[in-house]
Image (cartoon, rainbow, N blue to C red):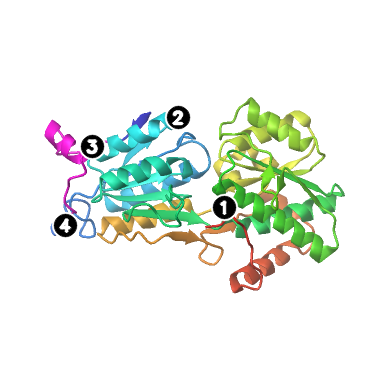
């Protein structure tokens, strides 16, 4: 694991203080009347912390987006965040312990895979506030978050993916290929929800246009498809991408942080003229090296959710009520088509705008068993 920080925290020199923090015995911070801790809107002793999953800060996806949100909030508040980068799943629990030991009062965990470590730490430290991205921290599956001091930051990505699937189908139909594909990292709700919406968007295109665009790599009804088993950009991910490309698709959606790099490598090696869709961030902006392959991106405003949660907690207004990003609140959306816009089928942008308005109005309901 690695720790990113620009200055040491004060008041943690004594071993007794660390032991006390680990035990979860601390008092809730009080508002700072002097403003010495970054302004009158920051409670005394407020210390935000962020823990990545194994993808790391430079994944060009949700870890990076979370870090950008935390960094923006910390800069505006005039405080220094503690950011702990996990290099494997073995780092999750130790990073949680370090965050508590360092006096963190808000700990934001990036991703579904940190749920167990977050619940364990939150239960042991009820006076510390927690937030977790892409999960409800419901490890006992009873339908409720497992600790009252955890705020889920989740996203109904199926709505934006529906638009992405419609666009992918329109692109493939225009080319005459009529085949699109997808594959994911781990088969978890925050990944499969993209694939559900994507398939439904393709089906909507076929319904509206009398088309026959096929989807490879995912069956929403059976909840089965192509997965790499992780989020690393490695040979397994490249082979998985190639398996989908071998079906003859000319659009592919890789869902899972860095695995888009493996998809890009497979596309480049094939020299096939295939385009891909990005996820989480606008991939054209996040990684210009793949701009010429990226038709559009299905985005989640993770940075905004982390920023808002951090600023609220800094003011003493932490609220554990789940945040759910939707098209309506702009927590999810499609990016620009950038240089591909001039090549789109005529009328597609207007059709996507109309579909978005219908989803927001409730006239179209994008249903996914993986939606929050």
Classify 121 as above or below 336. Answer: above
Q: Circle 2: is it few (<14), some (14-19), or many (20+) Cα within 10 Å? A: few
Residue picked out by circle 1: 299
Residue at (74, 52) in percent of width and height: 168
Q: Which region shows up in magenta? A: 6-31
| Residue 88 badge | 2
Q: Nearer the viewer, mark 1 or mark 3?
A: 3
Q: Nearer the viewer, mark 3 or mark 4?
A: 3
Residue picked out by circle 4: 30
Mark 3 to mark 2 CA distance (whole Å) = 21 Å
| Residue 101 badge | 3
Mark 1 to mark 3 CA distance (whole Å) = 34 Å
Secondary structure under tag 4 reads: loop
Q: Quadrant of the N terminus?
A: top left
Mark 4 to mark 1 CA distance (whole Å) = 36 Å
Mark 3 or mark 4: which comes first in sequence? 4
Tag 1 near tag 3, CB within 8 Å = no
Verify whether residue 24 appears in magenta.
yes
Mark 2 to mark 4 CA distance (whole Å) = 36 Å
Tag 2 near tag 4, CB within 8 Å = no
How far across and how far down the image is residue 97, in percent? 29, 36
How far across and how far down the image is residue 123, in percent? 30, 47
Mark 3 to mark 4 CA distance (whole Å) = 20 Å
């Amino acid at each position: 694991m690695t720790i990113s920080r620009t200055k040491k925290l004060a008041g943690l020199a004594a071993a007794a203080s660390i032991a006390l923090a680990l035990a979860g015995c601390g008092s809730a911070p009080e508002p700072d009347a002097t403003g010495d801790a970054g302004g009158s809107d920051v409670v005394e002793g407020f210390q935000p912390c962020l823990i990545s999953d194994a993808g790391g800060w430079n994944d060009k996806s949700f870890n990076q987006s979370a870090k950008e949100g935390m960094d923006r909030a910390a800069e505006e508040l005039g405080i220094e965040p503690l950011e702990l980068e996990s290099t494997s799943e073995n780092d999750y629990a130790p990073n949680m312990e370090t965050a508590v030991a360092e006096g963190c009062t808000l700990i934001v965990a990036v991703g579904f895979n940190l749920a167990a470590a977050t619940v364990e730490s939150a239960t042991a430290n009820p006076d510390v506030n927690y937030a977790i991205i892409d999960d409800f921290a419901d490890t006992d599956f009873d339908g409720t978050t497992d600790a009252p001091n955890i705020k889920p930051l989740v996203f109904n990505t199926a709505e934006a993916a529906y638009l992405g699937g419609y666009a992918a189908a329109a692109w493939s139909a225009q080319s005459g290929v009529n085949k699109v594909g997808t594959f994911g990292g781990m088969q978890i709700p925050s990944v499969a929800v993209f694939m559900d919406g994507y398939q439904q968007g393709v089906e909507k295109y076929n319904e509206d246009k009398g088309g026959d665009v096929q989807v490879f790599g995912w069956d929403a009804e059976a909840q089965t498809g192509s997965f790499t088993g992780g989020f690393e950009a490695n040979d397994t991910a490249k082979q998985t991408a190639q398996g989908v490309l071998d079906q003859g698709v000319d659009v592919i959606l890789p869902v899972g942080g860095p695995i888009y790099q493996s998809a890009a490598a497979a596309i480049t090696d094939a020299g096939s003229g295939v385009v891909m869709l990005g996820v989480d961030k606008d991939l054209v902006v996040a990684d210009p090296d793949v701009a010429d392959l990226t038709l559009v991106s299905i985005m989640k405003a993770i940075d905004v959710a982390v920023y808002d949660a951090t600023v609220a907690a800094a003011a003493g207004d932490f609220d554990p009520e789940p945040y759910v990003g939707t098209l309506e609140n702009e927590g999810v959306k499609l990016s620009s088509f950038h240089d591909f816009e001039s090549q789109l089928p005529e009328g597609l942008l207007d059709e996507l705008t109309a579909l978005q308005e219908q989803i927001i109005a409730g006239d179209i309901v994008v249903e996914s068993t993986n939606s929050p």
